[in-house]
Image (cartoon, rainbow, N blue to C red):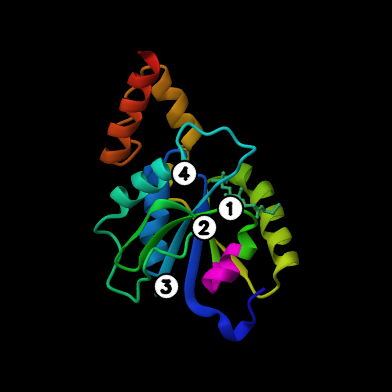
């Protein structure tokens, strides 16, 4: 584990599955990037979880979506990820893939803060458990929660997938590049 001296107090990590990224995720990314010098958006590779998009596809969608929203900051090089050739950066936002425990990856990146978005009380129990477990594993890593923008409280990746798979128009719920990718994936599946 990283010692305190190796941590950068200005480096935050925003982890998630991002399967696919939604406007709610992008809102948290933009707001978190304004709070810190460097924001690492970390895409989890979870072999147990069946995802619609591969890690590389999710990295690619996130990179397209964050393009232009990071500020100058002291952005990294996007190269600290554990997987995915598609990692990269925009301003002070790095987009990278990781596998294994989040606390270990955060330690390797020198991050001092985990950022999570909270939509409603229903998120709280799970996020509270994760935050306490992560704190138990690495006492120097803090978790902070950002309340989602009110217009995104109902939004989740699973809802977006379900709506899109059933033919609903989700263009207002995800970034334009994600919408195009989602449509292409569904068309490809229906061939
Ligand atoms: O968007 P999600 O699905 O809530 O993101 C979940 C993610 C990737 C943040 C979470 O599954 C995670 O942290 N995975 C790494 C494994 C780990 O450290 N688990 C927490 C302790 S049990």
Instruction: Tell me the tag on residue 55.
Output: 4
Circles 4 and 2: CB atoms closer than 8 Å: no
Specify few, some or many for label 3: CA neighbours under 10 Å numbering under 14, 14-19, or 20 or more: some
Question: Which residue is the site of mark 2?
Answer: 82
User: How much space separates mark 2 and mark 3, taking CA atoms?
Assistant: 22 Å
In the depicted view, which residue is nearer to us: 64 or 156? 64
User: How much space separates mark 1 and mark 2, taking CA atoms?
Assistant: 6 Å
Relative height, residue 10 to residue 95 (above, below) = below
Report x, y in % for residue 128.
Answer: 68, 55
Describe the element under mark 2 as helix, strand or loop.
Answer: loop
Q: Earlier in the sequence, mark 2 or mark 3?
A: 3
Rendering quarter of residue 23: top left
Describe the element under mark 1 as helix, strand or loop.
Answer: loop
Q: Earlier in the sequence, mark 1 or mark 3?
A: 3
The quarter of the image holding the N terminus is bottom right
Q: Earlier in the sequence, mark 4 or mark 1?
A: 4
The answer to whether residue 172 is visible is no
Question: Which residue is the site of mark 3?
Answer: 36
Specify few, some or many for label 1: CA neighbours under 10 Å numbering under 14, 14-19, or 20 or more: some
In this picture, which residue range is highlighted in magenta?
A: 105-113
Rendering quarter of residue 120: top right
Instruction: Tell me the tag on residue 99.
Output: 1
Report x, y in % for residue 16.
Answer: 52, 49
Specify few, some or many for label 2: CA neighbours under 10 Å numbering under 14, 14-19, or 20 or more: some
Residue at the (42%, 44%) spot, across then down: 56
Residue at the (67%, 59%) spot, across then down: 131
Describe the element under mark 3 as helix, strand or loop.
Answer: loop
User: How much space separates mark 4 and mark 2, taking CA atoms?
Assistant: 11 Å
Q: Is mark 1 within 8 Å of ligand 1?
A: yes
Circles 1 and 2: CB atoms closer than 8 Å: yes
């Amino acid at each position: 584990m990283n010692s305190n001296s190796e941590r950068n107090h200005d480096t935050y990590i925003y982890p998630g599955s991002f399967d696919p990224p939604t406007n709610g995720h992008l809102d948290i990314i933009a707001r978190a990037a304004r709070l810190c010098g460097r924001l690492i958006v970390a895409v989890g590779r979870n072999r147990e979880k069946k995802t619609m998009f591969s890690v590389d596809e999710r990295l690619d969608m996130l990179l397209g979506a964050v393009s232009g929203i990071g500020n100058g900051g002291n952005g990294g090089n996007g190269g600290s990820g554990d997987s995915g050739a598609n990692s990269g950066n925009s301003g002070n936002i790095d987009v990278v893939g990781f596998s294994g425990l989040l606390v270990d990856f955060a330690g390797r990146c020198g991050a001092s803060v985990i950022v999570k978005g909270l939509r409603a009380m229903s998120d709280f129990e799970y996020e509270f458990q994760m935050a306490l477990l992560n704190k138990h594993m690495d006492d120097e890593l803090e978790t902070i929660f950002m309340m989602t923008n009110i217009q995104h409280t109902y939004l989740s990746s699973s809802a977006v997938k379900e709506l899109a798979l059933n033919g609903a128009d989700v263009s207002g719920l995800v970034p334009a590049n994600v919408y195009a990718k989602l449509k292409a994936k569904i068309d490809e599946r229906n061939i």
